[in-house]
Image: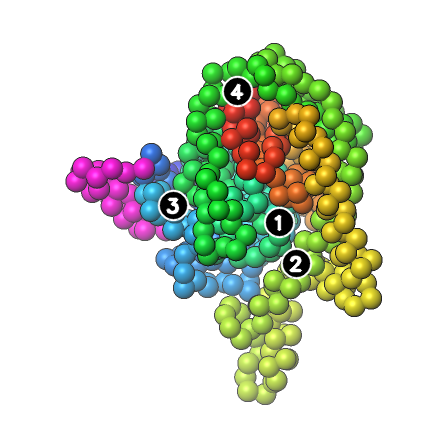
Amino acid sequence: AHLDRIAAVDAAVHAFLHVDAEGALAAARRVDERRAAGEAVSPLAGVPLALKDVLTTTDMPTTCGSKMLEGWVPPYDATVTTRLREAGVVILGKTNMDEFAMGSSTENSAYGPTRNPWDLNRIPGGSGGGSSAALAALEAPLAIGTDTGGSIRQPGAVTGTVGVKPTYGGVSRYGLVAFSSSLDQPGPCARTVLDAALLHEVIAGHDPMDSTSIAQPVPPVVAAAREGAAGDLKGVRVGVVRELSGEGYQPGVQRAFDAAVEQLSALGAEVVEVSCPHFGYALPAYYLIAPSECSSNLARFDAMRYGLRVGDDGSRSAEEVMSLTREAGFGPEVKRRIMLGTYALSSGYYDAYYGQAQKVRTLITRDFDAAFGEVDVLVSPTTPTTAFEIGERVDDPMAMYLADLCTIPSNLAGNAAMSVPCGLSDEDGLPVGLQIMAPAMADDRLYRVGAAYE
Ligand code: GLN
């Protein structure tokens, strides 16, 4: 049914870069055989899923939305991919994304933008717009995204779906093509909080192949979602972040958010206002740290080891081939970030830019620590606006970067955060997201509050 749905609507939505119909049907048949043989299978066995094209798969290409990796089939599966396969989850295909996960609209994909199923002239968010659009267009009931500065939560918000950035280190990054290694985190995308929790349990947990993976039990997210579904938040303290609302937020988004806060209070939560004074510096700190790490990580696309190779006709040096390949293979946003990051890390500037950004990162973490001393979760709108029009911000990188104003603090601090649908804006009728943030390894709190609210 999902393959039929993809065939019917994906020409218009363009959520997928690659669909593996045969592979999906074969995986589904294997689940049927295991069931018929009386084998115990996981709760998600046989459920179809859309996988962001930044996680490696041995049976499908992994392009990261870039010409640099067009047609590249990796020699190993990401740990997330392996865990999905072991659970019997049926991988339908790979979803579109901003090139190397850099962007907020999927317009930076080398393969053309994904469209928002709510309005095909609008963006589905990014970088994981393909995954969220696939959910909203009913092409898949589950999807995987990755979130470096908001790429799971912001697409979730603007497509009216659920997206979770687990605690940094909660889900393995092995086989996730690196953008900014200290921020990148894979996570579940779904249409309900309980679905996201079931998927979270499949993909989370310690992995010796990732040195930043946390060797602790997975927080009880499914139990928390079931508990939350009873709709009782008595005893839960919710902090509204003062710095993440007001000026610059669309009035329709602000009103939907205010109504959500009232509803949390009606469910029994104790709601207070909390100040996180350094959150205003999160965006500039992120746009030094993420490009710095990306300039180093993307050095591996050197035309020698894998991927695109341009101009290798025997007449040129390796350096010339490298340079021609990177010129042709990377799009403008990726080049901008490599240049920014190289500059910020260069000798003489390192302390002023990268070092300073790392100090700001510590201050933001301390803001969270202080806030979580008083409340169990923090809330804010997920994004300052609803889905903007395709083309509206492509020539204005600063406007594009603002989409992640509210999501970036949790990446910098490494804690857990969720976006859950929060009704429609009364201005334009488009979905709004409520962001819930919790301390590191307290991901279960997101699910308890999210399921109660939803
Ligand atoms: N939009 C942000 C950026 O462009 C975040 C991307 C992400 O989370 N991968 O960097």
From the viewer's perspective, is the residue at label 3 or at label 1 nearer?
1
Check if mark 3's residue and mark 1's residue have beta carbons within 8 Å.
Answer: no
Image mark for residue 379 = none
Question: Which quarter of the rendered picture does the N terminus lie within?
Answer: top left
Residue 293's disc number: 2
The mark that comes first in sequence, 3 or 1, is 3
Amino acid beneath label 3: Leu
Residue found at x 70% / y 54%: 289
At numbered mark 2, what does the secondary structure look like: helix, strand or loop? helix
Instruction: List the residue tagged with mark 3.
Output: 84
Q: Which residue is mark 4?
A: 452
Q: Is mark 1 within 8 Å of ligand 1?
A: yes
Residue 372 vs 208, above or below: the answer is above
Which residue position is annotated with label 1? 183
The type of residue carrying mark 4 is Ala
**Marks 1 and 2 in Cβ contact (< 8 Å):** yes
Q: Magenta-highlighted stretch: main secondary structure?
A: helix
Q: Which of marks 2 and 3 precedes in the sequence?
A: 3
Q: Which sits earlier in the primary sequence, circle 1 or circle 4?
A: 1
Between disc 1 and disc 2, whose residue precedes?
1
Image location (x, y in percent) of residue 427: 69, 24
Q: Is residue 31 magenta?
A: yes
Tell me the CA gap for discs 3 and 4. 27 Å
Q: Is disc 4 placed on a helix, strand or loop? A: helix
Could you classify mark 1 by the number of other residues whose Cα lies within 10 Å: few (under 14), some (14-19), or many (20 or more)?
Answer: many
